[in-house]
Image (spheres, helix red, strand yellow):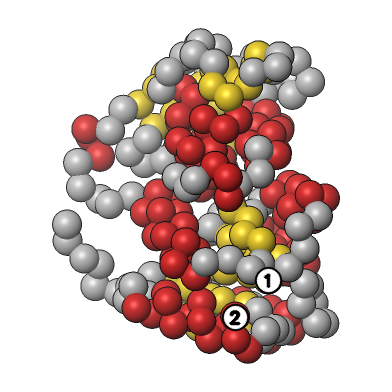
Amino acid sequence: MTQPATPPTILVVDDEPMVLEVVAGYLRRDRYRVLERSNGHEAMAWLETNRPDLVVLDAMLPGVDGFDILRFIRSRWDIPVIMLTARADETDRIVGLELGADDYVVKPFSPRELAVRVRNVLRRSVPSGNGLDELPVYSFDGLTIDTGTREVLVDGRSVELTVKEFDLLAALAASPRQVFSRRQLLDMVWESSPEFQDPATVTVHVGRLRQKIESDPGSPRWITTARGIGYRFEP
């Protein structure tokens, strides 16, 4: 595979010096360009004039917290954001996911696992530029999903999705009418051991997808619920 001339830029924001050092170190080993910020104000100041390829963002920061930074990022770009938190409270995770986080990692965590998640998210967020014509385009009645260009059209209108929202939609559309459990979707889309993920991650992403592609999110046309099991895509 041809390597890009410029490595992806990753912004790591965390107020714990040890976490910042370890995470940045692991990512630099993978040859990323890594920038470190230890508080929300510094991160916001940098983001005002710079666009990273991915952000690793601590939820609880002094000054400006991670959720405010995530809101700012989502107001400008659909770049991947992986949230870090020292709290295992499901409410915090759901808030982050609803705001548009692509993944959530609870401290303490394995730096190696985080590096793998970063690599997987980046691989999916940036098309390789090779062989796009070989990647499938799913066309349904008013809905088009182009897995090469990673574009989604609803009634001819372009819809902006985050990396994981697109991956989830494409995974469901690839197997119409097949029911997938939330655990199966975690394994398919997030590509990590399901025990490290909260099934609520899938629920939140499905809810966000419905808001973006369904004419009536309360009575979904495309992504339906199989009660007690999971979700299916209706062609």
Amino acid type assigned to the residue bearing label 2 in the image: Val
Q: How many marks?
A: 2
Label placed on residue 70: none
Q: Do the residues labelled 1 and 2 touch (CB within 8 Å)?
A: yes
- The residue at the point 74 percent across, 52 percent down is 93
What is the quadrant of residue 148 in the picture? top left
Q: What residue type is labelled 1?
A: Asp
Give the percent coordinates (x, y) of residue 190. 50, 44
In the image, residue 202 lies at what x, y percent?
A: 63, 36
Task: Tell me if mark 2 has few (under 14), some (14-19) or many (20+) residues whose alpha carbon lies within 10 angstroms of its own.
Answer: some
For image coordinates 31% across by 27% down, the residue present is: 136
157 or 146: nearer the eye?
Answer: 146
Which residue is found at the position 62% from the left and 77% from the top? Answer: 13
Q: Which of 201 and 210 is in front in this view?
A: 201
Q: How crowded is mark 1: few (under 14 residues within 10 Å), some or many (20 or more)?
A: many
Task: State whether residue 169 is above or below residue 78.
Answer: above
Q: Nearer the viewer, residue 198 or 176?
A: 198
Q: Mark 1 points at which residue?
A: 58
| Residue that appears at 53% across and 59% down | 79
Report the side of 133 relative to 103 (left or right).
left
Residue 40 falls left or right of residue 135: right
Name the residue carrying label 2.
Answer: 19
| Mark in front: 1 vs 2 | 2
- Residue 104 appears in the picture as rendered: yes
Left or right for 147, reference 201: left
Q: Is residue 164 left or right of residue 94?
A: left
**SS type, badge 1:** strand
Q: Quadrant of the N terminus?
A: bottom left
Please state the horizontal and vertical placement of residue 94, each as a whole percent of the image. 76, 48
Q: In which quarter of the image is residue 58?
A: bottom right
